[in-house]
Amino acid sequence: MAKALVVCIGNDLVADDAVGYQIYNRLLKHALPEEVRVLLLGVGGMALIEELKGEQLLVVVDAVQLGSPAGTIHVLDWEQIPGNDLRPVSGHGIGVREALQVCRRLYPERAAEDIYLVGIEGSCFDQVGAPLTKGVEDALPDAVSEILRLLETVSSPDAPAD
């Protein structure tokens, strides 16, 4: 069983919504340990439950809107994500948040022990066919580094075994 799952959310059709898609493709170019799975989900949501297998670590990657400048990288423990704002944190955040809540209640054996969001602050979510904005594009390498840093916690020799 994989110790970590990285779920990249988004698609390459709408400007900054392509963050997850771009990160997914970059992660596939890295020699990741066997205990790490990387998955691309277009919109996340309930399909996520089927992919969860009780991993030690779940990293959700998406474009976010938290009010910071475009390209800002947020690495947040899942419990730290603002959830009561009038606007959603992520265009897919509600579906993912609800899916994880359902999983914890109905399928606790599938729920990940630790969950993090690696989000890149986006600014353009309404232009079909547009490329990533410059700030978001420039942030991709550092976001990948942050994800790899999180993955080290489960793939290091000192990490607890199953």
Image (spheres, rainbow, N blue to C red):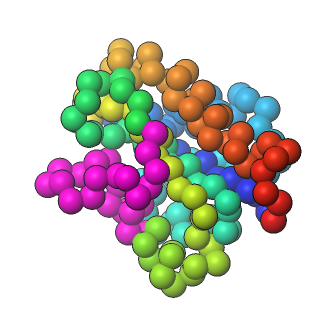
Quadrant of residue 132 within the rendered picture:
top left
Residue 52: x, y in percent? 62, 66
| Residue 86 placement, left or right of 50 | left
- Work out which residue is located at the far front of the displayed protein and give it: 158
Residue 85 on the magenta span: yes
| Residue 146 placement, left or right of 71 | right
Is residue 123 visible to us here? yes
| Number of numbered discs | 0
Q: Which residue is drawn at 26% across and 24% down?
A: 69
| Residue 140 placement, left or right of 82 | right
| Residue 111 placement, left or right of 67 | right
Residue 96 versus residue 146: which sits nearer the camera?
A: 146
Residue 38's place in the image compared with 127, above or below, is below
Quadrant of residue 13 within the rendered picture:
top left
Q: Residue at x 58, y 70 (%)?
A: 111
Is residue 130 visible to us here? no
Residue 77 versus residue 22: which sits nearer the camera?
A: 77
The quadrant the N terminus occupies is bottom right
Q: Which residue is drawn at 46% across and 68% down?
A: 100
Residue 124: x, y in percent? 25, 29
Quadrant of residue 55 within the rendered picture:
bottom right
Q: Which residue is drawn at 62% across and 41% down?
A: 150
Residue 77: x, y in percent? 46, 51
Residue 26's place in the image compared with 156, above or below, is above
The quadrant the C terminus occupies is bottom right
Residue 84 on the magenta span: yes
- Work out which residue is located at the far left of the displayed protein and give it: 86
Range of magenta residues: 75-99
Residue 115: x, y in percent? 53, 56
